[in-house]
Image (spheres, rainbow, N blue to C red):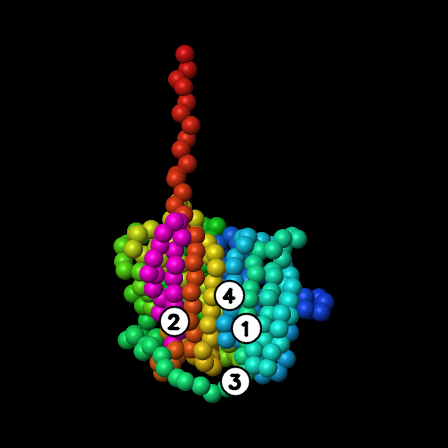
């Protein structure tokens, strides 16, 4: 089993370059560009680095502006917008090759008492009874293009276990609803910001596939252009990502080449600890046609 700390924690350990400026490295997940959840998580960490005291993130909202270059580090500029009595607000811009590729607004809140209510967690089989996604992918390795095979079958710091999984290569029409258990594969430090950043990282993983399910378009379809446009995370209660979390997602609408997905994250005991929303590009491109050749005279 891969040591999660050896993969995830270095991604979150941003290098300080100047006051409120940080640099992060990348990890290839086989998409040909930087994983959106990685940029979101690193930007959240950069914002947290500038917050004093025991204030933790309660919400973060990001826009993906340009695809990230896997071969170049990402530089994060943090604007300290406000330090109030209860809330702290930050804005982060991620830069590559002199251009903004992502921006984030994040708010941090002191711990204080208040009202409590939540939706109930849906019924789900125990995670120990569900096959890991990595195991399923390795079983179908011969169907994965050779250029992606090593990346997609490599060890992972996050163990995702989709319930009633869908085949990434075969068309299958289903309702726009998904559930999956996930956790990191090894224990992490107790710092709240670490668990929040890892959840932010994980929350973008496979999210838009929920919006594809009613249309029977496989995620790996060569005609499909898919990309996150914006992403939001609300953090309601303390949690640990080295313990099982249930990620429940649904997509109420797709229109205008965009799909909207929302998600809820529950602890195994049924506490709703985070909510997620994302809109993404879902564009079907026409296959390239060979030009007609005139017969030779």
Considering the whole magenta stretch, tell me its main secondary structure: strand
- The circle on residue 61 is 4
Residue 12 visible in the snapshot? no
Which residue corresponds to mark 1? 107
| The C terminus lies in quadrant | top left
Position in image of residue 19 (x %, y %): 71, 69
The residues tagged by marks 3 and 1 sit, at their Cα atoms, a distance apart of: 13 Å
Pick whichever of labels 1 and 2 is earlier in the sequence: 1
Front of the two marks 2 and 3: 3
- Residue sticking out furthest to the bottom: 113
Residue 145 x/y as whole percent? 43, 50
Highlighted magenta segment, given as a residue range: 247-266
Tell me, for residue 111, which label it has, or none.
3
Residue picked out by circle 2: 264
The answer to which quarter of the image holds residue 265 is bottom left
Q: Determine whether label 3 and label 1 are within 8 Å by CB.
A: no
- Judged by depth in the image, the label closer to the viewer, 1 or 2, is 1
Q: Is residue 48 above or below residue 208?
A: below
- Within 10 Å of the Cα at label 1, are there few (<14), some (14-19), or many (20+) other Cα atoms? many
Q: Residue at x 45, y 67 (%)?
A: 203
Which of the marked residues, 2 or 3, is nearer the chain's N terminus? 3
Q: Residue at x 42, y 71 (%)?
A: 275
Spatial distance from mark 1 to mark 2, Cα to Cα? Answer: 19 Å
Earlier in the chain: of badge 1 and badge 4, it is 4
- Count residues near mark 3 (Cα–Cα under 10 Å), then give few for <14, some for 14-19, many for 20+: few
Check contact, mark 1 vs mark 4: CB within 8 A: no
Report whether 18 appears left or right of 152: right
Q: Residue at x 37, y 74 (%)?
A: 246
């Amino acid at each position: 089993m891969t040591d999660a700390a050896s993969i995830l924690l270095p991604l979150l350990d941003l290098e300080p370059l100047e006051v409120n400026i940080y640099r992060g490295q990348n990890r290839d997940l086989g998409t040909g560009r930087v994983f959106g959840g990685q940029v979101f998580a690193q930007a959240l960490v950069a914002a947290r680095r500038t917050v004093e005291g025991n204030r933790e993130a309660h919400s973060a909202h990001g826009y993906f502006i340009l695809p990230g270059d896997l071969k170049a580090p990402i530089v994060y500029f943090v604007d300290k917008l406000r330090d109030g009595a209860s809330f702290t607000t930050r804005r982060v811009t991620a830069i590559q090759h002199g251009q903004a590729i992502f921006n984030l607004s994040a708010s941090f809140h002191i711990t204080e008492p208040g009202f409590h209510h939540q939706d109930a967690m849906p019924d789900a089989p125990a995670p120990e009874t569900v096959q890991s996604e990595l195991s399923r992918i390795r079983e179908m390795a011969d169907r994965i293009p050779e250029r992606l095979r090593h990346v997609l079958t490599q060890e992972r710091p996050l163990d995702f276990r989709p319930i009633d999984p869908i085949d990434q290569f075969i068309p299958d029409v289903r309702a726009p609803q998904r559930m999956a258990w996930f956790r990191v594969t090894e224990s992490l430090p107790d710092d709240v910001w670490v668990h929040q950043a890892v959840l932010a990282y994980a929350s973008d993983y496979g999210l838009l596939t929920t919006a594809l399910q009613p249309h029977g378009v496989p995620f790996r379809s060569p005609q499909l252009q898919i990309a996150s446009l914006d992403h939001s995370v609300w953090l309601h209660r303390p949690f640990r990502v080295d313990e099982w979390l249930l990620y429940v997602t649904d997509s109420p609408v797709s229109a205008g080449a965009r799909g909207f997905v929302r998600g809820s994250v529950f602890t195994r005991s049924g506490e709703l600890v985070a909510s997620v929303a994302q809109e993404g590009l879902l564009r079907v491109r026409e296959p390239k046609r060979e030009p007609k050749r005139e017969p030779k005279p």
